[in-house]
Amino acid sequence: MSSEQRRPSRERAASADWALYFITDTALAGGPDQVVQQVRDAIDGGAHVIQVRDKHLDDAAFRDLAAAVAAAAREKGEEVGRRIDVFVNDRVGIAAELGLHVHVGQGDEDPAAVREAVGPAAMIGVSCSRREHLEAAIAAGHCDVVGLGPVWATPTKTDADVPLGTDGLAALAARAHEAGLKAVAIGGVTARTAADVAATGVDGACVVSAIAGSDDPALVATFVRREFVMNQPLE
């Protein structure tokens, strides 16, 4: 086993339940207070991974939101008897300060610098929309999970790359697994599309607007998770 495979973050990624990965959206939720409640609801519906994402809040407000989400996830996880992993989107310093995992996009901080900031135990996720992005993440050697997408066009990210489709998603997921990484799909994932996503062999489905924009986040989360888990390929 390589030193990379023995790294605590890689071991944590291997034991995580990625099936339903909820990414917050403050605007769709109706404000920071509603984000925290949606996180609780998503966990009730079966989300085991949460990412706090907000491109508009200043660092102080974002830190408060991330801390509140982490506290809610910890409390709710204890209540339902599950481990809940919380990621911070992009803001590496805040992730390091709060002891949370971090997800970064293309062109953000150097992977080695991110690893140095968050330490060996925190999981690092990287967004990959093309094969060259994935190969760069593999070569850098610091990430544990890759977010592959967009699978389909999505209104929550208007500057996204060309959609992968299910065939493109399947190819990138296979390469990620070959390199020992976990792979989750993002972009247009809903209860209606979760089965198609699961069939590609990815480890999980990332959901933003289907949950954040719903009047019943827990119910939507339940449906997405059920469709994903029921349609995962048999090993």
Image (cartoon, grey):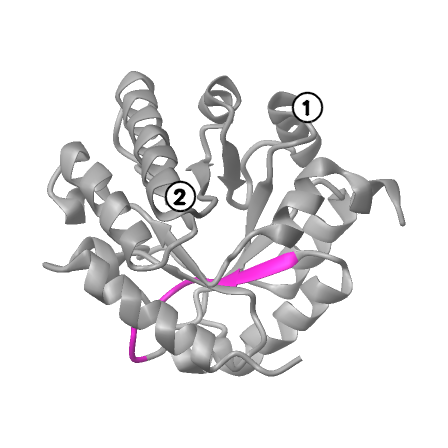
Amino acid, disc 1: Glu
Q: Is residue 170 left or right of residue 198?
A: right
Label 2 Cα crowd, 10 Å radius (few <14 / some 14-19 / many 20+) = many
* Residue 131 screen position, x and y as percent: 65, 64
Q: Left or right? Give the position of 91 relative to 30.
A: right
Q: Position of residue 95 (x, y in %)?
A: 48, 26
**Which residue does the image show at 56% across and 52% down from the upper left?**
16
Picture coordinates of residue 11, whole percent (x, y) = 70, 45
**Quarter occupied by the C terminus:** bottom right
Any part of residue 189 in sight: no
Give the residues drawn in magenta, as a range: 182-192
C-alpha span from label 2 to label 1: 20 Å
Mark 2 lies on residue: 51
In which image quadrant can residue 119 be found?
top right
217, 116: nearer the viewer: 217
Where is mark 1, residue-wise?
116
